[in-house]
Image (cartoon, grey):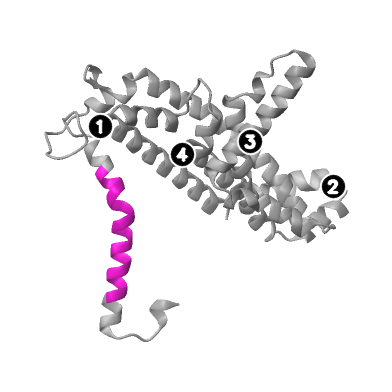
Amino acid sequence: MIPSLPRSNVAKWAYRAYVTLFFVYLGLPLAVVSVFAFNDSLFPSLPWEGFTLAWFFGDESPFIGVFHERAILRSIGTSAFVAAWVSALSVFVGTCNAFLFVRHDFRGKALLYMMMLLPLIIPGVILGISILVFTSSVANTLEDATGLWFDGLRPGLILVILGQFSFITTFATLVISARLQKFDPSLEEAALNLGATRAGAIRQITLPFLLPAIIASAVVSMLMSFENFNTTLMLVGSDSPLTITMFDKLKQGSTPVLNAVSLLLMLASAVLGLLSLLFQKKRE
């Protein structure tokens, strides 16, 4: 709407300058991080010492690259494991939530919907602490009653998965619900008239229609899981995901290997986002 409004030349140039500065503000830090991943220096800062790939493939100290840094590789595997579980749970529950809130009317629906949105406004640290306190209290009570050790309720990967799932599933619900609202229910009714069961109509008609949103929500869930720090920090055990490992290494002193990891994450995020976009366009 803004470009269609009558404006003076000054207003047009001011608008273009604002848009340009906005995208420079967003992209410049990422560009700086990417450039210093190739700096032949022990510190990610000026002056520029020359181009190198050692922070990716180096195997001799002090130039130990990402692909030879065991702690980082192990943490990437841990993050991938957590992200896969969080994505699967979020998409499944988000799909069920979408059908619940879009297809059904019941008493307390508005209250339940507001409760589903609450994790979006609760700070991640508070959410992590709340989950940790609750599960620890339950574990202590069960241990006193049974004498058994409930490891799944202690800090570790199970709590990390549950903590991230508790708010990421909200995003999945919103994405899938937006797609489901565009669905024409008469298509299901036609399938039912042709002899299909309710479950069969949903499986063969509705779910294929929702597939672009399901794929998009799965990608978003994985990316959000990979980058989550606040909630994960409160719930992590001995197996650290990537964000926690990078934070621990940053406390010891920043090196361009962290820039290299960040660049790889940016590339992976861009590829996943592009594939999701291409899939949605293909389905449309």
What x and y, as percent, mark residue 237? 53, 23
Q: Are marks 3 and 4 in contact (CB under 8 Å)?
A: no
What x and y, as percent, mark residue 3? 38, 77
Magenta-highlighted residues: 14-32
Q: Which residue is mark 2?
A: 198
The nearer-to-camera label among 3 and 4 is 3
The nearer-to-camera label among 3 and 1 is 3
In this picture, residue 117 sits left or right of residue 46 = right
Q: Residue at x 28, y 75 (%)?
A: 14
Looking at the rendered structure, the kind of residue marked 2 is Arg
Q: Residue at x 23, y 41 (%)?
A: 35
Can residue 274 be found in the magenta stretch? no
Q: Which residue is mark 3?
A: 131
Between the C-alphas of marks 3 and 4, the distance is 19 Å
Q: Which residue is mark 4?
A: 227
How would you classify the magenta stretch by its main secondary structure?
A: helix
Q: Nearer the viewer, residue 120 or 9?
A: 120
